[in-house]
Amino acid sequence: MKAFVTGGGGFVGSAIVRQLVDKGVEVAVFGRNHYPNLEKLGVRQFQGDILDSDLLIRFMQGYDTVFHVAAKAGIWGPKYEFEQTNVTGTRNVLGACFANGVHSLVYTSTPSVVFNRKDINGADERLPYAQRFLCYYASSKAVAEQMVLAGNSEILKTCAIRPHLVWGPGDPHLIPRLIARGKARKLKQVGNGQNMVDISYVDNVADAHVLAAENLHSAATAAGNAYFISQGEPVSLWDWINDLFQRLNIEPVKKKINAKPAYFIGALLEGIYMWFSVEKEPPMTRFLAEQLAKSHWFSIDRARQDFGYEPRVSTSEGLERVVKWLENEKVPGFQGSRGQG
């Protein structure tokens, strides 16, 4: 295997790169920037824009496996930005794969493509795509995933990995945002607090990608399929957040708001921010309200059966690693050790 990773300098992408390097795989990364941490690993780096299809074709020459991780994430922003990166960018990656005779493509997707504003309790990949999306990220990823899976053929084997709420040391999104809001006491429990959700430790997510790629090169039972990936057991969202806060000496979340008012506030804020062209993300959106109030966890049996995925790092072990990382690194919103609140 010779691997080409788009977005390889990001949180999930760099975890995939590290695992590939550990396996002795020759790896190249494509992204907007140069990453010193990847340079130390001896990884070849190509810089460019994923919207430049000619550049992708040129740089991808000689690689037989592509991990397409690059994406515009988030729940706020102009529609065209999400569609450019997530849809047009994915189309360009597919085109470059076919132009270079790439054997396998593993696409990083999201469970948000099936989130239909209802509780999801242990459902599997037979869930249909949502009919109405509350953020452009989810809608653009759904279109891109369908393109990738439709591109599966005897020439190019493709599959999609749907990790849910990825976290771990180095997390630039979920953990720092929780800490910042927790320390500022701006986090409220939405709904009755009984909702169960999936979370995914970053090294487990990387495992799933690498295992899927190896499968596409062998039995190919993963070809043409999408897979939910998680810890294999859901957590009570608000208990998990408060457990993290307790370890960091942050006041637990005590304030509450019902789901319907939170949704209404989110809709109102979205309207105001759009009217006044505010680029900053609103403190509440309809999508966020639904995600914080509803259960959304999935069966990972299909990934287990098709390519032998098992979460190697448990939730408790992952939490210990995160706390150690927070103590040793300067993370936005978190200062010093556990004793500092």
Image (cartoon, grey):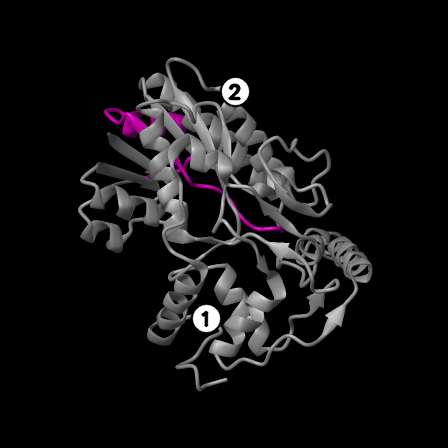
Q: Nearer the viewer, residue 55 or 44?
A: 44
- Residue at 49 percent across and 73 percent down: it is 333
| Residue farthest to the bottom, as pictured | 339
96 sits left or right of 135 in the view: left
Q: Main secondary structure of the magenta part?
A: loop
> Where residue 107 appears, x then y in whole percent?
44, 34
Query: Picture quarter containing residue 282?
Result: bottom right
Amino acid identity at mark 2? Ala
Label number found at residue 150:
2
**What is the magenta range?**
47-76
Query: Quick check: marks 1 and 2 in contact, CB under 8 Å?
Result: no
> Where residue 168 appears, x then y in whole percent?
41, 59
Which element is circle 1 on? Answer: loop
Label number found at residue 332:
1
- Residue at 45 percent across and 60 percent down: it is 315
Q: Quadrant of the N terminus?
A: top left
Amino acid identity at mark 1? Pro
Query: Is 67 part of what is drawn in magenta?
Result: yes
Query: Is 127 part of what is drawn in magenta?
Result: no
Q: Earlier in the sequence, mark 1 or mark 2?
A: 2
